[in-house]
């Protein structure tokens, strides 16, 4: 192909002209095909180094060449790692900005991977700075030897790569916090319902006084009956009379039991039987008294 288009996506329009016109031929003009032109990428001007965070003049950088592994660094929380590089299109000989560009650190002991994004500046030069003190939490405070990788990928690259630049030894001062991992298969702790604590009751003298005041009218009634001389000679002596008064007294006693320890449903069950007995006895007693008059 004489023409070498730049990387990217193209739409090709194809026209096929037969040597002899034939009306049966259709679709031979204006046919469109989508084509992706790929290229190869190379790394140029790559440098990596360390510097103290409070001393810019102490920066020390080393030039590196793709795809060699030649970096050996040793940093602590008072330093930072900096890196710069450019990506160049081999075919067009021009700077290239890849869709995915990462710097990855891999712990050689635990195989933990810590990935950071490398961003290009206005001149398409990638710059990466890692302040060890600020990023030690991302490493889970795990000091040790790490491999440094540069990862570059794009949908128009023939040769996406993961380049191992070298190694770095991190020394973190903070202690790794205790693991918060929870096994999802372990039994959960028992849930115990906490009832509301009972409210503080008043002194017993208050409740006793109230009970006496409630019973006082009944006691006063008996005292007045004795004082005035109640006449019980006309009290009807029959089974219906005894049943009515006993039923009435039982209902009052049931109310006292409900107030002290019975619940509503138990009280209604007992009240149904006592009420029926009291009603029948009272009806027969009143009918008898009405007939005697």
Image (tube, rainbow, N blue to C red):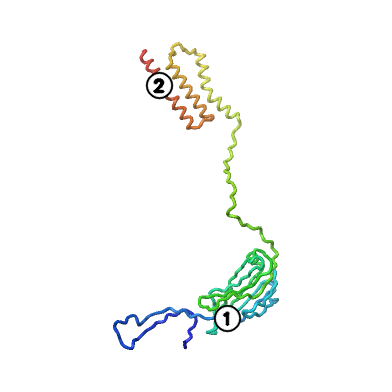
Which residue is the extreme one toward the left?
A: 23
Residue 115, how many percent across, how many down? 60, 69
Q: Position of residue 2 (x, y in %)?
A: 47, 88
Residue under numbered circle 1: 42
Check the image and report above or below for 60 versus 180. Answer: below
Q: Where, quadrant-wise, is the C terminus in this rendering?
A: top left
Of residues 69 and 177, the one nearer the viewer is 69
Nearer to us: label 2 or label 1: 1
Q: Which residue is mark 2?
A: 280
User: Viewed as shown, does residue 54 lie left or right of 254?
Assistant: right
Q: Position of residue 232 (x, y in %)?
A: 46, 12
The label on residue 239 is none
Q: Earlier in the sequence, mark 2 or mark 1?
A: 1
Q: On screen, 40 above or below 238?
A: below
Secondary structure, mark 1, is strand
Label 2 SS: helix
Badge 1, how many Cα within 10 Å: few under 14, some, many 20+? some
Q: Residue at x 49, y 24 (%)?
A: 252
As rendered, which of 11 and 184 lies closer to the eye? 184
């Amino acid at each position: 192909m004489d023409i070498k288009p730049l990387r990217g996506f193209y739409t090709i329009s194809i026209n096929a002209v037969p040597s002899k016109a034939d009306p049966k031929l259709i679709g031979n003009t204006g046919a469109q095909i989508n084509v992706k032109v790929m290229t190869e990428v190379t790394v140029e001007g790559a440098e990596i180094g360390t510097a103290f965070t409070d001393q810019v003049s102490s920066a020390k950088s080393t030039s590196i060449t793709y795809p060699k592994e030649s970096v050996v660094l040793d940093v602590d929380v008072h330093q930072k790692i900096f890196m710069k590089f450019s990506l160049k299109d081999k075919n067009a000989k021009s700077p290239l900005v890849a869709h995915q560009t990462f710097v990855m650190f891999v712990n050689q002991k635990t195989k933990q991977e810590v990935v950071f994004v490398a961003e290009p500046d206005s001149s398409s030069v990638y710059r990466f700075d890692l302040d060890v003190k600020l990023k030690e939490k991302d490493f889970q405070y795990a000091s040790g030897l790490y491999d440094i990788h540069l990862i570059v990928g794009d949908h128009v690259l023939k040769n996406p790569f993961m380049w191992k630049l070298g190694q770095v030894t991190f020394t973190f001062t903070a202690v790794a916090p205790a693991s918060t991992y929870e096994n999802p298969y372990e039994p959960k702790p028992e849930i115990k319902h906490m009832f509301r604590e009972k409210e503080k009751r008043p002194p017993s003298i208050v409740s006793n006084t109230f009970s006496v005041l409630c019973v006082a009218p009944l006691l006063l009634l008996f005292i007045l009956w004795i004082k005035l001389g109640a006449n019980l000679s006309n009290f009807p002596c029959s089974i219906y009379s005894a049943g009515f008064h006993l039923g009435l007294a039982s209902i009052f006693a049931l109310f006292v039991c409900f107030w002290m320890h019975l619940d509503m449903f138990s009280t209604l069950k007992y009240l149904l039987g006592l009420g029926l007995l009291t009603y029948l006895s009272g009806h027969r007693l009143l009918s008898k008294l009405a007939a005697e008059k």
